Image (cartoon, grey):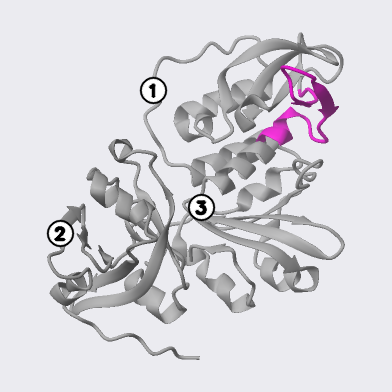
Amino acid sequence: MTQTLPSLITEAAALSDAGPGFQRYELGPAVLATGPDATVVVVEAGDRPGVSGVQNDTSVLLPGAAVPALHLRLVHPAQWPVRVFARLDGGCLPLGTAIAARAASAPADARGVELRFEQPLHRELLDLVRPVPAPGPVPGVEWVDQVEVQPLQALEAFALGWFPAEHAPGPEPELDGLPQALAAYHHLARRRPALLRFRDPMLERPRRASGPLGGRLVFAEWLGGGMDWSVPWPPEGPGKADPRVWHTEDPYDEPETSVEAEPLSRFLLQFTLYEALNGAPYQAWAQSAPLARLDPLLRPLRPVPLSPFLPAYSAARFHVAPGLLAMVSSDEHEAVVTFGALHRAALTPLLAHGFSWSRFDG
C-alpha cells in the first residue's frame, strides 16, 4: 500500500517548532533547536551508517553532544518532545517524534546519542531520507566447497574476501610451537587485522592455563572472559596436528569444560563466521520466524557444512551468499534468524518474505 508522504517545510519553519526564542546548535551535519515547546532535530538525508542521520526505520544517530543543556534535552525528553526532520533538496520532511535509546553518560564522552522513533518510518519515507545505495563488489562463496576437505583454505578465502586489507600493526608475532591451524590463523591476521578485533577476541598471544581436563592453551575468549576456548597443551596424541577444542565456562571460578564438535581448523572458521556476522555493518534480525517459512528465505543462500555453533546456547548453523551471512537457531516450532551484510542492498530483497524484523538495516 502506498503511503502519503508529509509535506516539505522550510528549515526555518522546522526549527521554529521548538518555540519562541529557541537556541540553535550544530552537531556535524545536524542542526538542533531547543525552546520552550520542543527539541527539534534536523538531520541530513543520506546513508551514513554508524555516523549520523537516519540509520533504519526506528533509529536516528547524532554525533557526540558537547553542550550539557543539549545533552540533557535529548537524554531526558519527558518535558520537551524531540521532533525529527530530514533535510532534502526542497526543504525539510517531518519524520515524527523520538526518544533517546542510549547516550553517553556525560556530554564530554562525545559518543553520540541514538534516538528511537516512537513510530517506525514506513518504507517509502525511509527510502526517501535514507536511500539504499547500489551495492559495491561482493566476495564470492566458492570457499564453501573447501570446508569439508580444506577448512583452512576455506577460512583464508572467506577472510580475504570479507574483511578489508590493512597494514598489519607491530612486528610479526612469535608463532613457533602453535598448532598449525592456529599459526595459520595468526599469519592470516597479518593480512586481515580485523581477525584480531572481534567483539569476542581471538587472543594475539595465546596463554597457557589449566582446567578440568588438564593443561590447555587458551586462544579465544567470549563475554569478557566468562567463557573461553582452548586446545590441550602440551599437544599430544594422534590429534595434535588438528587438535580438539575445549570450551570452558566460568574459567576463573568454577570451570566446566566440554569438547567442541569440530577440530581446531574447522572451529576457527565457525568462530570467524560468527564474529563476522555480528560485526557486519548492516544487519537484520527475525526473532520468531515460523519454520514453515524458512525455506524460501534461505533458498538463495548456501549452507556451510559445519556442526551447530555454541550448541548449549544457540546451536547456530550458517548460510552464505555473496556479501551476505546468515545464522539460524531453531527449535521444533520457530527460529531466530540473523543476517549480516557488507552492503545495505544485500538485505533489501529479504523484505519480500514478509517477516517481522526486530532490526532491519536494508
Q: Residue at x 29, y 45 (%)?
A: 64
Marks 2 and 3 sit apart, C-alpha to C-alpha, by: 48 Å
Give, as a three-letter code, the residue at label 3.
Pro
Q: Which residues are magenta?
A: 242-268
Residue 169: mark in rendering? 1
Q: Which residue is mark 3?
A: 139
- The quadrant in which residue 284 appears is bottom right
If you read the primary sequence from the N terminus, does the residue marked by circle 1 or circle 2 appear first? 2
The residue drawn where x is 33% and y is 72% is: 129
Q: Earlier in the sequence, mark 3 or mark 1?
A: 3
Closer to viewer: mark 2 or mark 3: 2
Q: Which residue is mark 2?
A: 23
Q: What is the three-letter code of the residue carrying label 1?
A: Pro
Is there CB contact under 8 Å for labels 1 and 2? no
Left or right side of 154 for 231? right
Distance of mark 1 from mark 2, alpha carbons? 45 Å
Tell me: residue 343, above or below residue 278.
below
| 276 to the left or right of 286 | left
**Rendering coords of residue 154 (x, y %):** 64, 41
From the top left corner, tell me how far across and down residue 36 is, in percent. Answer: 23, 65
- Place of residue 32 in the rendered image (x, y in percent of width and height, measured from the top left): 22, 60
Label 2: which secondary element:
strand
Residue 330 visible in image: yes
